[in-house]
Structure formats: structure tokens, C-alpha cells
């Protein structure tokens, strides 16, 4: 297996990242990098596919699944953020990196996310480059991917509908998928990337485990759960009670103590 496509994908990701950075200087808003994040993976997957001709059944399957996940997430985030000011997370990063944030953002926002996406895309490279036949593990991977998409897309849909109702302003969504995990969308993303790793294992790339481990750390400790919950309690006082009642990440029934409290009240 030649590593040339993997290095070519880094170049493609960085080119798109630089062009997006230039646009951010004009717009004075870097938060649209969130819409770009999932597209980095699609760009990498396309590069892998072009270099892997003719494509195997696994390669076609993985390419389609990446495209579905990437485009859905990018479109959802773009629609959600359309017409909104720069996200509060990036406003904080901007304030903490003055003066010269415009130039610094090339590295600490666009470059960093591009490099992380390239590292996480390793199982995609293995899966799409492989020409071996499908195995039972590939079907298991596809099933896990579907579960992940249901949680991620379903959670996003339920949250968008909840926020669209003015009566819910300042409230906490605790129904649907959000009843069983405080972050169904992040859990779904977690499942999707472990599913891509299963595809890679089936193709002989067990060593690409760095990808799902890195994505899991990002979701749990860096830009996902940890970052969101560090400030959300201040913005939504009801969230503290929601934390006591609901699993943080992995779905499960509500805690028994919380249920007893609800019954007694």
C-alpha cells in the first residue's frame, strides 16, 4: 500500500483550509470552520478514492458513508449558524489571542482542525485503499455506523426543533434521545468513527486505532462534552438537575435516585 494518497490528502486539506482562512479574514468570523470540519474528511476520502482506482466494494461503501455523514453534518451546522454572530467559543479564542488573531487563526483554528482531521482520517485511507473482499466485520461496521447516524442526526433534529419553539428559551431538552444521554449527537459521532475503524480492521489496518481514540478524546475531553458543559450551566440553570438525572455520554436509563425524587415530588 502506497502512502502517497495519504500525504496528498494533507495537501488538499491544507489548501482548502488556507482558502477558508482568507475568507474568514474578510468575514471577520472563524466559526464557519465548524461547517468545514466534516468536509475535510470527505476531501481526504475523495483523494484516497481517486488514487485507489479501481475501487473495491468496501471502498465504495466507505466513500458513500463518509459522504452522507460529512454532507449532512456540514449542512446542518451551516443552516444552524446562518446569520448568527461568531460562536462564543471562537470569540473567547479571539480575545485570548490578541493582538494578531487574524494571522494566528490560520494555525490555531484552520490549520489545527485540518491537521486533526487528517490524522483522524487514517482508517478511511486504509479502508478505501484496500482491495480485499468484504467480511462479516464490514457488516458489523455498517450497522454501528447506522446506529451512530441515528443518534447524531436524530439528536441534532430533536434539538433544532426544541430551539425553534420560543417557549423553550432557556430550558433544557430532556426528551427523545436526550432523555438517555446528554450528548446523543456526540455519542453518534463516537459510534461512526469506531465504525470506520472496524472497516479498517477488516482491511488489515488494526494499527489505525489512533484515529478513533483521538476522536473519542476530542469528543469527551476537548471540543465536545467538556467544552460545552463548562459553560452551559451558567446559561441554563436547569442543566445542573439534568446532569444529575441523565447519563453524560453513553445512553442509559435515568438514575434511580432522580426517579425516586420525581415520584416523591
Image: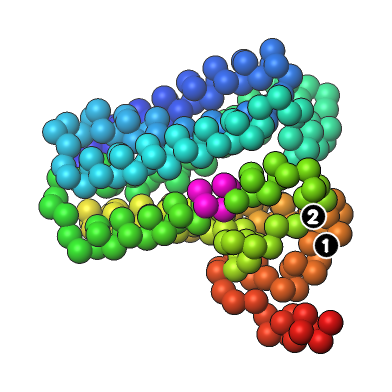
Q: Is residue 18 above or below residue 119?
A: above
Under circle 2, the secondary element is loop
Magenta region's main secondary structure?
helix
Q: Is residue 100 left or right of residue 103?
A: right
10 Å crowding of disc 2: few (<14), some (14-19), many (20+): some
Q: Which residue is mark 1?
A: 238
Q: In the image, residue 217 lies at what x, y percent?
A: 57, 57
Q: In the image, residue 119 lies at what x, y percent?
A: 45, 43
Considering depth in this image, is 66 or 119 the residue closer to the camera?
Answer: 66
Magenta range: 153-157
Report if residue 220 is visible in the image: no
Q: Which residue is mark 2?
A: 171
What residue is rendered at 72% in x and 52% in y?
A: 228
Q: Is residue 80 above or below residue 23?
A: below
Q: Do the residues bearing badges 1 and 2 touch, measured as CB atoms within 8 Å? A: yes
What residue is rendered at 76% in x and 28% in y?
A: 85
What residue is rendered at 29% in x and 34% in y?
A: 48
Amino acid at each position: 500500500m502506497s502512502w502517497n494518497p495519504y500525504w496528498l490528502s494533507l495537501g488538499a486539506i491544507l489548501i482548502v483550509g488556507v482558502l477558508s482562512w482568507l475568507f474568514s479574514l474578510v468575514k471577520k468570523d472563524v466559526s464557519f470552520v465548524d461547517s468545514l470540519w466534516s468536509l475535510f474528511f470527505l476531501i481526504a476520502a475523495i483523494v484516497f478514492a481517486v488514487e485507489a482506482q479501481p475501487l473495491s466494494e468496501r471502498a465504495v461503501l466507505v466513500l458513500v458513508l463518509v459522504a452522507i455523514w460529512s454532507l449532512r453534518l456540514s449542512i446542518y451546522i451551516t443552516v444552524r449558524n446562518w446569520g448568527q454572530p461568531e460562536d462564543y467559543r471562537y470569540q473567547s479564542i479571539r480575545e485570548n489571542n490578541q493582538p494578531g488573531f487574524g494571522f494566528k487563526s490560520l494555525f490555531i483554528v484552520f490549520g489545527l482542525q485540518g491537521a486533526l482531521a487528517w490524522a483522524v482520517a487514517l482508517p478511511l485511507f486504509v479502508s478505501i485503499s484496500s482491495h480485499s473482499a468484504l467480511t462479516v466485520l464490514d457488516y458489523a461496521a455498517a450497522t454501528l455506523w447506522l446506529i451512530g447516524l441515528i443518534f447524531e442526526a436524530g439528536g441534532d433534529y430533536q434539538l433544532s426543533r426544541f430551539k425553534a419553539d420560543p417557549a423553550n428559551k432557556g430550558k433544557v431538552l430532556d426528551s427523545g434521545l436526550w432523555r438517555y444521554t446528554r450528548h446523543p449527537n456526540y455519542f453518534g459521532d463516537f459510534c461512526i468513527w469506531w465504525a470506520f475503524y472496524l472497516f479498517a480492521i477488516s482491511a488489515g489496518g488494526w494499527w489505525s486505532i489512533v484515529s478513533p481514540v483521538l476522536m473519542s478524546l476530542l469528543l469527551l475531553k476537548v471540543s465536545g462534552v467538556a467544552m460545552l458543559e463548562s459553560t452551559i450551566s451558567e446559561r441554563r440553570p436547569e442543566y445542573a438537575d439534568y446532569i444529575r438525572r441523565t447519563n453524560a455520554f453513553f445512553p442509559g436509563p435515568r438514575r434511580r435516585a432522580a426517579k425516586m425524587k420525581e415520584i416523591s415530588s
